[in-house]
Image (cartoon, rainbow, N blue to C red):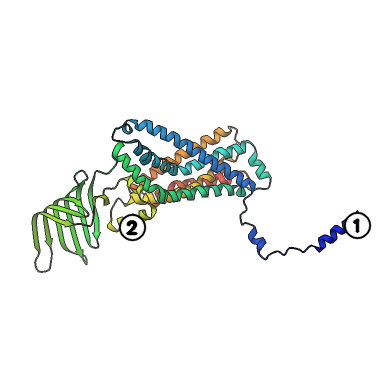
Amino acid sequence: MKESQIEVQVTEEKRPKKKKKKGSHFFSRPLFPILRIDRYIMRLFLGTFVGAISLILAVSVIFDINEKIDKLASPDCSLYEIIFHYYLNFIPYYGNMFAPLFVFVSVIFFTTKLAQNSEIIAILSGGFSFNRLLRPYFISASIIAFATLLLNSFVIPPGNKIRNDFYSKYIKDKTVQYASTIQLELSKGEYLYIRYFSADNNRGYDLSIDNFKKGTLVSRLVASTASYIDDYNWNLEDYTLTRYNSHQDSVRRGASLDTIIGIKPSDFLVATMDAENFTTPALIDQIAKQNKRGVSNVKIFEVELHKRLASFFAAFILTLIGVSLASKKYRGGMGFSLAIGIALSFTYILFMTVSSSFAISGVMPPWLAAQLPNIVYALIAFFLYLRAPR
């Protein structure tokens, strides 16, 4: 026995030792290692999220078909348009809109189940802190939040245009039919005013265009009616063009005048749903363009932009609330946690809708209106986080 042990030791000593590459140990260890428990929670999180959102969207489609069956059964509306123009864009739009809330419900559902099975207690007793437990939750929330942001910014808006056109054509026309008291800047020092514009006949009434140079009015064009033709071409009826100068003013009147005005009806006939049709880069350009012209309906576009950003942060805030709320064992079991979660979800939707209306009406800035639900719920999340099990 001793001789064999000695032989083994000798052979081991003769074996050449592998040289460790410098720095290989550092780079071989990830900064935030993902353990088996992390993969387990992430699988539960993402699986529950996909299952919940698929189930709710399937039910939503059934209810939507039942509600609109009379309109969809119209002979003018083809099955191809119903499926590929409307519902193929309906599903990602509403799924993406309510993704943060589905995150919230999913977290509460499976975390409550873990807590009831004493798995949360076992994880925390095994050396995991509550902050460390949050890591797989926030990794999963990050995946959903970034996917939501990308879809909302680039993929869904073109589909919204198709869906909204279908809705206005076959179900209910939501396009803006008129506008009143239109005031905007056409170019530097050139201001347009239209008392009333009707989309039915593309005609405006009581138009005036004032041209200023260095703060001095140099010309004014007024017309009783202004009809939009196409490509910025307008026809003015019963017009008067007055040019002001230091020596003598000149006045020109006529029954009809064809002219080019740097605006078209779509610039001021804006519905709330129109902002959904823009990708985020196009939305930023539209806001800059509308702000430069001084168009009052720019708030619709600003609210949409800030809502997209708010949706990104909402996923993390609602995840923290869900984990902090559901990681405790309650006497009422899963039903108690789900009841609180659903109540908070509906409150969040109501809060988001009301604050958006305040922004469009000018009561509060668009960024504050979009982020106000997140601010309030972030305070709730912090309070629940402090009371979470450690």
Kindly state the secondary structure of the residue where label 1 is placed: helix
Judging by the rendered image, the residue that carries numbered circle 2 is 288
- Residue 108 x, y percent position in the rendering: 54, 39
**199 on left or right of 330:** left
* CA separation in Å, label 2 and label 1: 87 Å
Which of the numbered marks, if any, corresponds to residue 3? 1
Q: Are marks 2 and 1 in contact (CB under 8 Å)?
A: no
Kindly state the secondary structure of the residue where label 2 is placed: helix
Which image quarter: residue 61?
Answer: top left
Which image quarter: residue 124?
Answer: top right
- Residue 281 x, y percent position in the rendering: 38, 55
Q: Nearer the viewer, mark 2 or mark 1?
A: 1
Question: For the point 53% across and 35% down, which residue is it?
Answer: 338
- Residue 54 x, y percent position in the rendering: 48, 38
In the rendered image, the vertical position of residue 331 relative to residue 177, given as above or below = above
Say what amino acid the circle numbered 1 marks. Glu
Question: For the point 31% across and 57% down, which residue is it?
Answer: 289
Say what amino acid the circle numbered 2 marks. Ala
Question: For the point 50% across and 38% down, which residue is it?
Answer: 52
